[in-house]
Amino acid sequence: MASKYDGLARIIIQNVGGKENIASLEHCFTRLRFRLKDESKANTEMLKQSDEIVNVIQSGGQYQIVIGNHVGAVCEAVLDKAKLKKADSEEQNEEKQGIFSRIINTISGIFLPVIGLLCAAGMMKGLLVILTAAGVLAETDGTYIILSAIGNCIFYFFPVFLGYTAAKKFGISEIIGLAIGTIMVYPTLIAVMSGEPLSVLFEGTAFESNVFLTFLEIPVLLNDYSSTVIPVILAVWFASKVEKVAKKIIPDVVKSFLVPLLTLAIVIPITFLVIGPIATWLSSGIGLIVQFLFELNPILYGVFVGAFWQIFVIFGIHQGLIPIVLNNLATVGYDTIFAATLAAPFTQVAILIAIILKTKNQKLKTTSISAFFSGIFGITEPAIYGVTLPLKKTFIISCIASGIGGGIAMALGVKFYTMGGQGIFSFPCYIDPNGSAVNSVLMAVISIVIAMVIAFVATIFIFKDKKESKVKETKNDSQSVEIASPMKGDVVALHDVKDQVFASGTMGKGIAINPTEGKMIAPIDGVVTSLFPTGHAIGITGSNGVEILIHVGMDTVNLKGAHFTSKVKQGDSVKQGDLLIEFDIEGIVNAGYSTTTPIIITNSHQYANFDLTTKENVSSNDTIITLG
């Protein structure tokens, strides 16, 4: 089925090195997260030139293309155009990654599928706290009981959900992952813990544990694994190793039932005897470390976490903190990490408001308005990558203000009690179920408002619109800029090009040519700022500031360089008329590809006047675009 993002999908596929270079693809709220077999084949600069792409980030072993709120539809279009199945897109290329990148990738892959449900369940729990505090519902009401089942389902049965997602991530049968999760919350095992212990191990130490049953006369250190995170992940990882061996030694005729039997028979006892207790102690240790840092100096702790949170987001490190947050909620009953970051999305919103009020740059204003609506719902990537980070000073302001907000929140005793919504929907998460709902939320609001005021005022004083100085600088060199035709051929209106991204003007205004000679020359004096490895596309920045993209043919990246010969390399200075690329028109056409060549001015929004040639045919060096 055709999608309005098909054109963008083709551009993305071409510029990440083609579908054969994609090892895996997934997405979060705003980003396409690629794992590329060879990132050097990707053309980052070419991708950044698309107005539909906010930014490109290479971090944590991932090639991240920031899209915005419609990232899900774009991801589907990319999968469709690249002929990738979702299962195929999850193949890993981890041998090329460092250990830190692999850990972040693993954690992200396990938790991303359940984040939406976590937020939804958390919002329901927050709503129930509000309704009971207001006297609308009582905990004994049937309505409350049914709605609380929605709010508690994922938290109580968390090992079941993580058993499934971890199994997908570790490449084993999802059914086995589900089985491990359900066994860990098996009611009979939990009920045993309500009786008298048979004995006590490690008495008097931090590891003191009651023994309620034995397995083959070996004491089992039972724990309540509902709501836990680390034990089931380690258990499924261990199962992935056992299942691999089982598949090798068990005959094909009985594999369907003996592989899961052998796997569970080995993994489950080991989980309850070894993995579970160690993981529980580890979980408790992490919670104690976070609590220790908080108690050491809560204000400095809040300033540090709040100030650096957005930097964590940029590098994808924030995904690795989610298990710690969930662990804190399960073991301590509240979390301080998310509490210290409460101001971060709102400082971005405050900065966007200040920029919207001050800027005269229409593109920046439009981008800021769009990012504002995402920001109030806690999705700050469009604001960070599209506005504040490129402006640099505003991003620093946001970090400083968020740090101050985090410090104030810790000083006021703000805590995060349940997973829930983001942005304006996050306030129920700060309601103390055992205290005053109004007071706990009020402290959070005070912290946020102070941080927002600081960010807004600082931006009003520091932000300066760069549009006027840039245009003035361009026009000092010449009252108008003339762009010569890079090739001989027939003129084609850009809107007639058989590619939505080019035809719609998404990448900028321009014109197209059907070449009659296989030579591309420099249309202006400047520097080759980007050159696709296959030689089918090139970017040039003129000495007067104009930015030009020339793309020979449609989908010609699939030729993998065949029929193209580059005469320059990225970084070369060129003069108008210099030969850039030679290409074989007949060979390209015979291979089934169009040679229609868009010539795009990617910063065309900076020019008040944009005039195109009226000629139907042009020769190399004929003026085809005049900017003023």
Image (cartoon, rainbow, N blue to C red):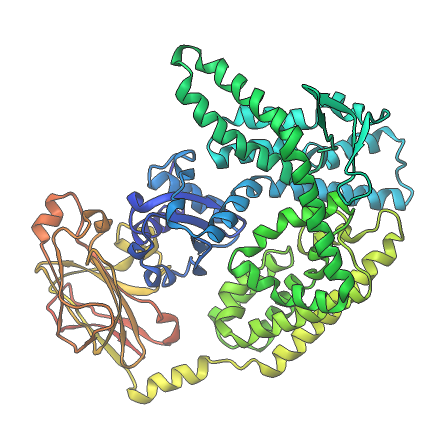
Residue 504 visible at all = yes
Between 258 and 37, the residue placed more toward the observer is 258
Determine the residue located farthest toward the bottom in the rendered image: 476
Q: Residue 628 appears at what percent x and percent y? A: 32, 79
Q: Quadrant of the N terminus?
A: top left
- Is 407 on the left or on the right of 382, as rendered? right
Q: How many labels does the image show?
A: 0
Q: Nearer the viewer, residue 76 or 238?
A: 238
Image point 20% across, 57% down: which residue? 536
- Residue 251 vs residue 571, the one in the foreground: 251
Rendering quarter of residue 339: bottom right
Residue 12: give x, y in percent of width and height: 35, 51
Question: Would residue 409 be seen by someone viewing this image from the given angle?
Answer: no
Give left or right: position of 225 versus 437.
left
Please identify the residue farthest to the top as the structure is shown. 253
466 w.r.t. 235: above or below: below
Does 363 sit above or below residue 377?
A: below
The picture places residue 155, in percent across and down from the top left corner, at: 71, 37
In the image, taking residue 94 as reference, residue 307 lies left or right, namely right
Is 145 on the left-hand or right-hand side of 546? Answer: right
Question: Which residue is painted at 74% across and 30% down in the image?
Answer: 222
Q: Is residue 227 above or below residue 298?
A: above
Q: Residue at x 82, y 25 (%)?
A: 198
Residue 19 x %, y %? 31, 44
